[in-house]
Image (cartoon, rainbow, N blue to C red):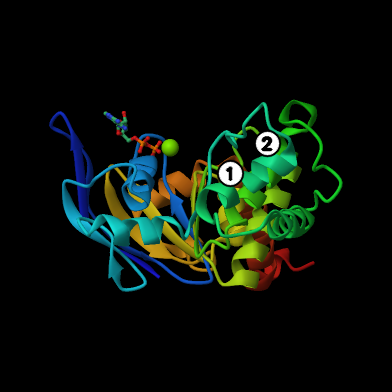
Amino acid sequence: MIEIHNVQKSFDGNAVLKGINCTFETGKCNLLLGGSGTGKSVLLQCIVGLMKPDIGSITFDGTVFTNNKVNIRQEIRRKIGMLFQGSALFDSMTVFENTEFPLKMLTPEMTKEERRDRVEFCLKRVGLENAGNKMPSEISGGMKKRVGIARAIAPNCTYLFCDEPNSGLDPLTSLKIDELIHEITHEYNITTAIITHDMNSVVEIGDHIIFLHKGLKLWDGTKDTILNAEVPELKEFIFSSSLVRAAKRVDEQEGGLESISAEDPMNAH
Ligand SMILES: Nc1ncnc2c1ncn2[C@@H]1O[C@H](COP(=O)(O)OP(=O)(O)O)[C@@H](O)[C@H]1O
Ligand SMILES: [Mg+2]
């Protein structure tokens, strides 16, 4: 579990995070949901140590990360897998070499054969067992995300962070990537945090959802409770999603017809 306590961050007097308190639960897909510019990426960068919060603390399974000793912070960092927004593969390396890269960096004690076994296992897990020799330029956007996931989980990460994993993907490929992240999270009991503004992801894989708005957490809950949340900013966000608008229209039409025939005997025949 990752615990965020009163995290605040400003840039030149512009308060971006205004005291965030939330937890990312173990073995779950924790979604950081919110519109553009609400501070999702800044919070993620604070959590993984790319940025330092002005105030507040971040704890990984009971070990404080913020302001702790360098070796303790490095130990936590080694357990973090990151899927970057644009996949961020190395163009000059094959799919195999991209996946092997963090193993060479983080686990120098592994032999070449052990690395090969691990890379082959991870590529198979993401459905790319035959793509090891391909270059990033030869594969689709969805495949690149899969390589990104394989690379993130290769060093047996305890924590997985994904920044907008569906950006630039078509709806079906997005669904497949969401499902893959969800399966891997549950299978290996990883604490996964996913930045998104996609309501499709919310209803598919939102085990735990944290809604950010203008640097504050306004709500958290699950995909089963989000549609009934009584937070105006969250309602506005949800109903601005075209999918949910369409679903709500169908629901209203069906509910409306039922209620007419049930309540008004004049309409019953
Ligand atoms: N390194 C930075 N320096 C100054 N301002 C930043 C920096 N990073 C982010 N911001 C500002 O913080 C706000 C939130 O950004 P961000 O966390 O990227 O939003 P999003 O929720 O879309 O991920 C934006 O107004 C952005 O301009
Ligand atoms: Mg962002």
Residue 231's x, y, as percent?
A: 35, 56
Q: Is residue 99 left or right of residue 29?
A: right
Residue 240's x, y, as percent?
A: 50, 41
Asked if the residues shown at circle 2 and circle 1 are in contact, with their CB atoms under 8 angstroms apart, the answer is no
Residue type, numbered disc 1: Pro
The answer as to whether callout 1 falls within 8 Å of ligand 2 is no
Q: Secondary structure at mark 1?
A: loop
Mark 1, residue position: 165
Q: Is residue 247 left or right of residue 34?
A: right
Q: Is residue 159 left or right of residue 166?
A: left
Q: In this rendered view, identify the residue nearer to me: 31 or 61.
A: 61
Residue type, numbered disc 2: Leu
Q: Secondary structure at mark 2?
A: loop
Q: Quadrant of the C terminus?
A: bottom right
Among the 4 quarters of the image, the one containing residue 166: top right
Mark 2, residue position: 169
Residue 115, can we see it?
yes
Q: Is residue 41 left or right of residue 253?
A: left
Q: Residues within 10 Å of mark 2 (few under 14, many from 20)?
A: some
Q: In this rendered view, identify the residue nearer to me: 106 or 143.
A: 106
Q: Residue furthest left?
A: 13
| Residue in view at x 39 percent, y 54 percent | 211
Whether residue 52 is situated above or below residue 57 in the rendered picture: above
Whether residue 101 is situated above or below residue 103 in the rendered picture: above
Residue 249, can we see it?
no
**Residue 243's disc number:** none
Q: Quadrant of the N terminus?
A: bottom left
| Residue in view at x 79 percent, y 56 percent | 124
Q: Residues within 10 Å of mark 1 (few under 14, many from 20)?
A: many
